[in-house]
Each structure stands twice: as structure tokens, then as C-alpha cells.
Image: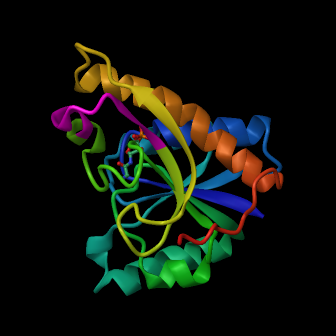
Amino acid sequence: MSIAVFASGSGSNFEVLTEQSRKKWPEEVSLLICDQPDAGVLERAERLGVQAVTILPRHYENKAAYEKAILSCLQEQGIEWILLAGYMRLIGPTLLQAYPWRILNIHPSLLPAFQGKDAIEKALDYGVRWTGVSVHWVDEGMDTGPIIDQKPVLVEPGDDLHTLMKKVQFVEHHLYPNTMYKLLTGKISDSPRVRR
Ligand code: GAR
């Protein structure tokens, strides 16, 4: 059993997930799937010695074909879990059906507030006193799947995008690896709670 991370950006979450998986988890992050040829996460994968596969959606006819290409790569590597970490794309039925309740995402807000892109900026613009981080199961929606864990982050007077992002990412880098560790070791249930 092994774990793939999907990422589109700088990859700070990918890096802590990989490191923690090596130190602490019963399974390791063994594959990075990236959809951006110049994403910073690719350099991190090289430095950490994690196999990286860049699969560009524009090379495929449609989303199903794109996800089929990803799926065959995952199956070749025996991947059982998918962790989205700054992967800026919705997951479609091809991957959802192949990995039922085996795909997690991290989002930089206290969901259901500020779904989608630029969540930290939206929280600042709205003027909330508290924002935070959510780890949730992935479904077909945009940051809509059942929540597994959340941690708050205080928005202090004078915070700007840079300072708030730093605080949010600090919390992300603890919450995501810890949540996955708990799932892998049975400390929290790996079947989603059904919302009422
Ligand atoms: C993270 O803050 C993650 O929560 C966010 O992208 C960032 C990626 O940072 N994801 C989303 O906004 C998903 N809706 P990283 O590339 O340094 O890990």
C-alpha cells in the first residue's frame, strides 16, 4: 500500500507529508502527480527522491481521458491513497470511483467558509476574526466533501496576505500529516461521517 500526492504549486505540503510518512507513518508517499510543468513541487520531489509524473490535461481529449492516464500510473505503482495538496483541479468520476473514500484534500479555511481558490485572501477581505484549515474527504464538488479535521487560525490586526498565509501554512503542515497518520493507524475512522 502506498500513497500519492497530487499538487500544482510550490509543494510545501507535499514536502512535509513525504517527510512525515518516512519518519512516522506505516506507509510512505511514493509518487507525486503534478499538472503544471514548471511547478516548484517538482524540484522538491527531485530533492526528496520521490518519483514525479507530470500529466498535462491539455494533452487529453477530455477530463475522463486525463484521469484515465493518471489512474493507470497510480495502478502501476500500487497506490492506495491520494492526498491532494494544492492540486487546483476538481476530481472527476474516474478517480472517485477507483478510490472511494481514499482521497483527501487540505483547504486553507474553516470549511464550508471560503471554498475554492484564494481562500486566505477571501477570509481577509471578508474581515473574519478566525479562519483556519480543513482536511476533508474529496467528493465531486469544490471543497465540499465530509470534514475529517479542522484547526482555527486567529486573524490579528495588521495581518496581510503574507503573514496570514504563513500562519495558515504552519497549521496545515501539522494538521495534514497528523490526520493522515491517525487514519492510517486506525486512530480515526476511515469511513466518512454522513452529514445530516
Ligand atoms: C495550500 O495552502 C492548500 O491548502 C491550498 O493550496 C496551498 C498549496 O500550498 N489548497 C487549496 O486552496 C485547495 N482549494 P503548497 O503548494 O505550498 O502545499
Please state, as top left, top right, bottom left or bottom right, where the N terminus lies in the image.
bottom right
Give percent across and percent down for residue 63: 34, 81
User: Which residue is depicted at the point 36% across and 45% down?
Assistant: 9
Name of the residue lying farthest toward the front: 196
Q: Nearer the viewer, residue 64 or 129?
A: 129
Give percent across and percent down for residue 172: 51, 36
Q: Nearer the viewer, residue 184 or 79?
A: 184
Q: Is residue 129 a member of the stretch shown in magenta?
A: yes
| Residue 60 visible to an observer of this rendering | yes
15 sits left or right of 38 in the view: right
| Residue 44 visible to an observer of this rendering | no
Q: Is residue 85 a member of the stretch shown in magenta?
A: no
Give percent across and percent down for residue 43: 45, 39
Residue 71, relative to residue 87: is it above or below? below
User: Which residue is depicted at the point 26% across and 51% down?
Assistant: 117
Q: How is the image coloured?
A: rainbow
Give the image quadrant in which the ligand numbered 1 is located: top left
User: Which residue is depicted at the point 83% across and 51% down?
Assistant: 185
Name which quarter of the figure residue 141 lies in: bottom left
Q: Nearer the viewer, residue 164 or 39?
A: 164
User: Which residue is depicted at the point 66% across and 46% down?
Assistant: 179
135 sits left or right of 140 in the view: right
107 sits left or right of 129 in the view: right
Name of the residue lying farthest toward the left: 125
Residue 196, relative to residue 25: is it above or below? below
The region drawn magenta spans 123-133
Q: Nearer the viewer, residue 160 or 4?
A: 160
The total of numbered circles placed on residues is 0
Give percent across and percent down for residue 73: 57, 73
Name which quarter of the figure residue 153 lies in: top left
